[in-house]
Image (spheres, grey):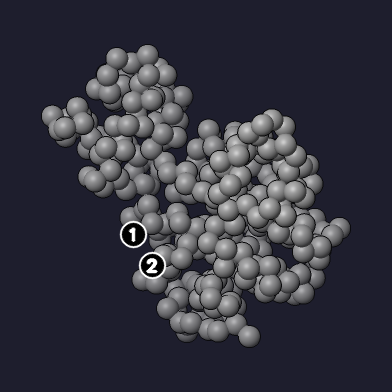
Amino acid sequence: MNCFGLTVADLNYIRSFIHKKAGIVLSQDKDYLVESRLAEVARVLGQPTLSTLIHLLKNRPTHQLEVMVVDALTTNETLWFRDKRPFLALQKQILPQIHKTKTERKLTIWSAACSTGQEPYSLAMLILDLHIFHQWDTTIYATDISQKVIQKAKTGIYSQFEINRGLPAKYLIQYFRQIDKDQWVLKEPVKRLVRFSQHNLLNDPPPVYQVDLILCRNVLIYFDVEARTHILQQLYKALAPEGFLMLGASESTLGLTDQFIAQQYDSSIFYKPVTKHGFKDHRASSMALAK
């Protein structure tokens, strides 16, 4: 028994369970997180201890129980216009380039692991603010493994605390309506651009193909090498030949796949599907500066 009241066997089972279901690697320094998050699941289900909850998961698992455990153990940290500089690159270069080069007036974006919706809604506001996609068929597919966060994201309702995390004042004024002292809701022009659904990056096929832009940011860091490679292959399949992939600042395709080439826009890195462009001799470690 360790200091968190869970046996080593129980912790190992949970690590194996979440890796199998979601591909996520839980290191031993996250043991405290496992206990604190599963304690709430045990409380909701009326289980007296974490041990009885894990016993139930092992011996009498239901779909609802498995979903609740996955929801509890997946990280849902997010904020508006996260890191800012990549969104500036999207505004100034990437989206205008997509607009210029596409022959069909259709814009398709996939926000993978979208959490409670701040990322895809940030994109929607950016697109509306650009005005260049007026009368285009624009859809942002926003997916996450957690049913709980998808349900929240669909409402478009955020607390003042959530609003304060990165949302520029001009967007709050333009695209939100206050519905309570501490509650804001997104206006319909923003909400209608985003289509939310549950999706498992490790086990499910892409929800859409021929995608112009994929955002899969600060996600790969939670997976092992095998899972990262598989996910990148799925993202590659989903991208249009001239599409863009955006990863987190600390993430890269280097050493995982040769299907992407990195390109720099201002101070942000985006990835292009290499073989779809005929650059078969390039590797993802190559760096091409965008003009």
The image quarter containing residue 225 is: bottom left
- Is 24 above or below relative to 39? below
- The residue drawn where x is 56% and y is 41% is 161
Q: Hey, which residue is sitting farthest front in the picture?
A: 181
Residue 198 in view here: no
Residue type at mark 2? Answer: Leu
The image quarter containing residue 40 is: top left
Name the residue that disc number 2 marks.
Answer: 256
Residue 107 coordinates in the image, percent (x, y): 73, 60
Q: Nearer the viewer, residue 228 or 121?
A: 121
- Is 249 above or below relative to 20? below
Looking at the image, residue 231 sits to the left or right of residue 186; the answer is: left
- The residue drawn where x is 40% and y is 61% is 229
Residue 47 coordinates in the image, percent (x, y): 33, 16
Name the residue that disc number 1 marks.
Answer: 225
Residues at discs 2 and 1 in contact (Cβ within 8 Å) = yes
- The residue drawn where x is 63% and y is 85% is 291
Secondary structure under tag 1 reads: helix
The image quarter containing residue 181 is: top right
Residue type at mark 1? Answer: Val
Q: Hey, which residue is sitting farthest right in the picture?
A: 135
Q: Nearer the viewer, residue 187 or 228?
A: 187
- The residue drawn where x is 67% and y is 74% is 93
Packing grade of label 2 (10 A; few <14, some 14-19, many >=20) is some
Q: Hey, which residue is sitting farthest left in the picture?
A: 1
Task: Pick whichever of labels 2 and 1 is earlier in the sequence.
Answer: 1
Packing grade of label 1 (10 A; few <14, some 14-19, many >=20) is few
Looking at the image, residue 115 sits to the left or right of residue 41; the answer is: right
Looking at the image, residue 29 sits to the left or right of residue 251; the answer is: left
Residue 124 coordinates in the image, percent (x, y): 70, 53
Q: CA distance from mark 2 to mark 1?
A: 7 Å
